[in-house]
Every structure is written in C-alpha cells, then in structure tokens.
Image (spheres, rainbow, N blue to C red):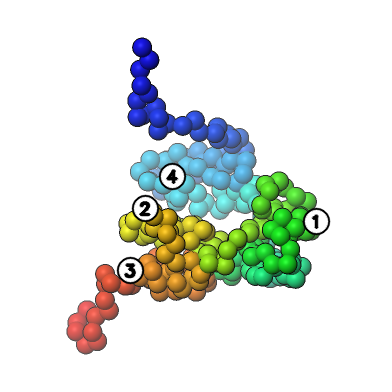
Amino acid sequence: MKRPPSSYSLKRRKQPKRKRLRVAETIPVVGTAGNVYEVVVLENGKVRCPCKGFRYRSECRHLLDPEVRDASSSRGPTKRPYGEVAALATWLAGAILPCCRKVKIMGSLRRQRPMVKDIDIVFVPGVASTQQVVNLFRTFGRPVHHGDSMGAIVTPAGIAAQLWPVEAEEVWGAAQLHFTGPRDYNISLRIRANRRGWKLSQHGLVERASERLIAGKTEEEVLAALDLPWLPPTLRDDHRRAKVLRVGRRTRLRPPGKGF
Ligand SMILES: [Zn+2]
C-alpha cells in the first residue's frame, strides 16, 4: 500500500539551482585586534567576510576597507553620475511616450542618487500594446532578456535599462512604490502590510484572504492605507532615520513644552 505523502514532502518543492558565483579574488584585511580576515570578492562584485560576530556578514566593517571597495566596484556593474544616466533615461522614456498612457522613470534615478547603476522605467500601455512597446524598447540597445512582457537592454553607452509594464492604472501607485525602492524600504512596507493580513506588491495592496484590492492607484493611497505619510523618493534611502515608518497611530508627537 502506498503511503500518503507527508505534509512535509508536499510543501517542499524543488527549488531551481542557484548559480554558484565564482570567487574572483580574496583580499586579506587586518582587523582592529590584528586578526586577518580573508575577504572574498565574487565575480559579480559582491563581497563576503568570514569574520564572526556579525549578523549580516555582508555588512561588516572589513568590507568597508578601501581596497575591498575598489575590487568590488571594478567587478560589479559600474555606477555612473546621476546626470549622465538621467539624460539617457529621459530620452528612452520620451521615445516610448507616444505609444503609452503613462511612462515614468523609477529606481535610483527617481530617488536622485548621486551615482546610478541602471535605468528602470514603468509604463501603462496606450495606443500600442505592451508587447509593441517592449519590442520598440528592445531596439534601443542590445536585448539581454527575452521575457515576453518586459524589456531589458544594454544601451550603446553600456548602461542597463529595464522596462516594466503596469497593466492597470488602478495599481500605478503600487507599481511606483515597488520600482522606486530601495529594497529595504519596500520590505518594511511589506512587513507592515503582512501584519494586517494584506499583501503588498507591484500589483497593489491586496487583502490576503479575499484578494480584494485595498489600494494601489497612487503611492499616497497605498501608504495612507498603511497609516503612513507619503515620503519623497529622495528620502526613501534614509527612511529609517526619517522615522516615518513609526509616525501614525503608534507614536504621537509630544505636546510642546512637556519635557524631553
Ligand atoms: Zn568582517
């Protein structure tokens, strides 16, 4: 008689194998106590430190060593000054604009980071279909990804650019939040949504049980549903310091004059 599969084996699906990154070089870094740590630089420019005592080994102080940073930036995708990338992004966005209802530049460009790695553009299709816009976009550089609904190219200037379709204007705001980032701001928002039984993604703020769309049309609407104020993109990299995630019902500003 066949045994019914345990819930464990039902849950456990085969995960696609992750590509193992080759170690490009190791750099010895001398710590404060004179210990030497062999910092590993991977082929994609990511760095890892073998030191103990840090929760996130990819964030330890040894990785801030100038030599490690140099080795890392020479391998990873090179960042370029904001102005240079912004000009190219504006051109790309302008070129697809006539076929679209909405086009907007996202990512670190929208956050106006001084150095930018690549370009992210979102659009809502208009007179042309999603596929037509993507096909047009792919002619602006060397296509690197052949997914059917997104365009990813490397422009002749060597800057990578991604084009993401947003199918419905009802989730335009949610898509903007998602593609503007940065990652840890998005994660904080998602955790907050999860705690309320909702789920947040580029497809909107959705009630988990019923799949009902709670908010999504504008960033303000999504953030307001989470009891958060809208945060200008330029401040999102610093959202923890801005403490905006805590503003809301939980903490109130003290009335003036009543001690600190
Ligand atoms: Zn370390």
* In this view, the mark in front (3 or 2): 2
Secondary structure beneath dot 1 equals loop
Label located before the other in sequence (3 or 1): 1
Q: CA distance from mark 4 to mark 3?
A: 27 Å
Q: Residue at x 21, y 87 (%)?
A: 257
* In this view, the mark in front (3 or 1): 1
Q: CA distance from mark 4 to mark 2?
A: 37 Å
Which of the two residues, 66 or 135, is positioned nearer the viewer here? 135
Label located before the other in sequence (4 or 2): 4
- The residue under label 4 is 57
Q: Is residue 242 left or right of residue 219?
A: left
Label located before the other in sequence (1 or 4): 4
Residue 221: quarter of image: bottom left
Q: Residue 92 in the image: x percent, y percent?
A: 74, 65
Decide: marks 4, 3 in contact (CB < 8 A)? no
Quadrant assignment for the C terminus:
bottom left
Classify mark 4 as within 8 Å of ligand 1 or not, answering yes or no. Answer: yes
Quadrant assignment for the N terminus:
top left
**Above or below — where is 251 with respect to 34?**
below
Q: CA distance from mark 1 to mark 4?
A: 41 Å
Classify mark 2 as within 8 Å of ligand 1 or not, answering yes or no. Answer: no
- The residue under label 1 is 139
Q: Residues within 10 Å of mark 4 (few under 14, many from 20)?
A: some
